[in-house]
Image (spheres, rainbow, N blue to C red):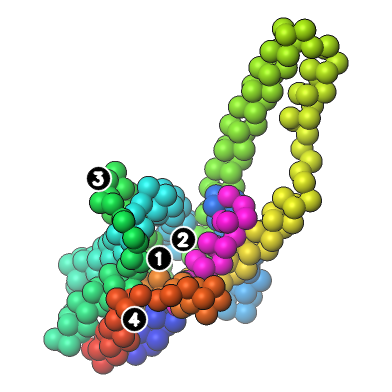
């Protein structure tokens, strides 16, 4: 019962985090938003550590760090495949695979067993994940092989996160999540720095090329230097600064909510079976679409309503099992 409650609650909170992250990514780059979210989640978990507690040992620290690295792979592939599209196919594909991988691990490797209603609940939950994540697109084209492979890889990595975090002991508390967020933040900020360096080098090269072109055309050397300096001026318009600040604030909120979701899912895994926690945790698109409907007035498709109903039914069946 607790597994179903924690996992489904965590999925809904995860959806809220994705919603905030999506808003943040519209104002700053998705990479920067993810990095800031990871850092704010890390700070929150550090603050909560004295309250929630947790024992430190090499085994749990290692698996927490591994889960953070795997999570970065999952997020990176998710953004990449959604950029390729169509989202209406690749998004639910990622969610379903992220549920199937831990289910197979739990049933085959860990030896988890259920009553008959439990297996029916798992199957129904997988169908619900597919329906909830389906976003109808007008004129959507067939996904490319590259997009499908990225979606499957993203789902497998997210499922790998569940498996990795399941290897930690109950006594570790939120220590594995602390390592998860810390490793995630380090990797994402390193990626942000690398991208910024490449962009800066390209911009510098273009500026020098334009300056040389103007000098060659007879423009005064001083004018060329002024043009180059203007291109390299780090200052930004006030509108851009306000968008940056708004994006950072949303990313911080995303990280806080995401850390709470991770904690709920961790509690769900430890309260019961990995297969149940992971398949219910894959319902995270439900939180996103509900918030989008309430805040942005976006329409929820009938197929998604059907998925939400099936998700509740599946959760009830798994709770009984």
Whether label 4 touches label 1, CB < 8 Å? no
Range drawn in magenta: 11-29
Whether label 3 touches label 4, CB < 8 Å? no
Q: Nearer the viewer, mark 4 or mark 1?
A: 4
Which x, y percent locates residue 74?
40, 54
Would you name the residue on which mark 4 appears? 305
Q: Is the C terminus in the top left, top right, bottom left or bottom right quadrant? A: bottom left
Q: In this rendering, does residue 33 appear at all?
A: yes
Would you name the residue on which mark 2 appears? 64
Mark 2 secondary-structure assignment: helix
Quick one: label 2 or label 1, which is nearer the N terminus? 2
Would you name the residue on which mark 3 appears? 145
Would you name the residue on which mark 1 appears? 165
Q: Magenta stretch: residue 46 in it?
A: no
Which residue appears at 79% of the width and 17% of the height?
224
Which x, y percent locates residue 98?
31, 63
Q: How many marks?
A: 4
How far apart are the alpha carbons under marks 2 and 1? Answer: 6 Å
Left-right relation of 242 to 187? right
Q: Give 28 or 17, whichever is nearer the viewer.
A: 28
Which residue appears at 55% of the width and 49% of the height?
31
How far apart are the alpha carbons under marks 4 and 1? Answer: 31 Å
Q: Nearer the viewer, mark 3 or mark 1?
A: 3
Mark 4 secondary-structure assignment: helix
Q: Nearer the viewer, mark 2 or mark 3?
A: 3
How far apart are the alpha carbons under marks 3 and 1? Answer: 30 Å
How far apart are the alpha carbons under marks 2 and 3? Answer: 32 Å
């Amino acid at each position: 019962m607790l597994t179903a409650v924690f996992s489904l609650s965590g999925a809904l909170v995860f959806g809220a985090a994705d919603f905030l992250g999506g808003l943040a990514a519209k104002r700053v780059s998705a990479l920067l938003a993810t990095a800031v979210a990871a850092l704010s989640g890390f700070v929150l978990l550090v603050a909560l550590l004295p309250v929630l507690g947790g024992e430190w040992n090499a085994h749990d620290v290692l698996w927490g760090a591994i889960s953070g690295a795997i999570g970065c792979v999952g997020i990176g592939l998710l953004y990449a495949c959604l950029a390729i599209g169509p989202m209406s196919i690749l998004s639910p594909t990622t969610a379903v695979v992220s549920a199937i991988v831990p289910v197979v691990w739990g049933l085959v490797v860990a030896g988890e067993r259920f009553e008959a209603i439990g297996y029916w609940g798992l199957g129904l939950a997988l169908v619900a994940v597919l329906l909830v994540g389906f976003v109808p697109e007008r004129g959507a084209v067939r996904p490319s092989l590259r997009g499908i492979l990225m979606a499957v890889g993203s789902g497998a990595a997210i499922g790998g996160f569940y498996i990795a975090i399941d290897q930690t002991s109950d006594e570790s508390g939120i220590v594995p999540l602390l390592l998860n967020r810390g490793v995630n933040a380090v990797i994402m900020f390193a990626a942000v720095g690398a991208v910024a360096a490449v962009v800066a080098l390209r911009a510098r090269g273009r500026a020098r090329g334009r300056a040389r072109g103007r000098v060659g055309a007879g423009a005064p050397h001083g004018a060329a230097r002024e043009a180059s300096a203007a291109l390299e001026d780090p200052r930004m318009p006030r509108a851009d600064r306000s968008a940056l600040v708004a994006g950072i604030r949303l990313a911080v909120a995303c990280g806080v909510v995401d850390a709470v979701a991770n904690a709920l899912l961790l509690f769900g895994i430890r309260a019961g079976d990995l297969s149940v926690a992971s398949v219910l945790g894959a319902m995270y698109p439900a939180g996103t679409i509900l918030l989008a409907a309430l805040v942005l007035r976006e329409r929820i498709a009938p197929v998604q309503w059907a998925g939400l109903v099936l998700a509740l039914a599946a959760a009830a069946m798994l709770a009984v099992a």
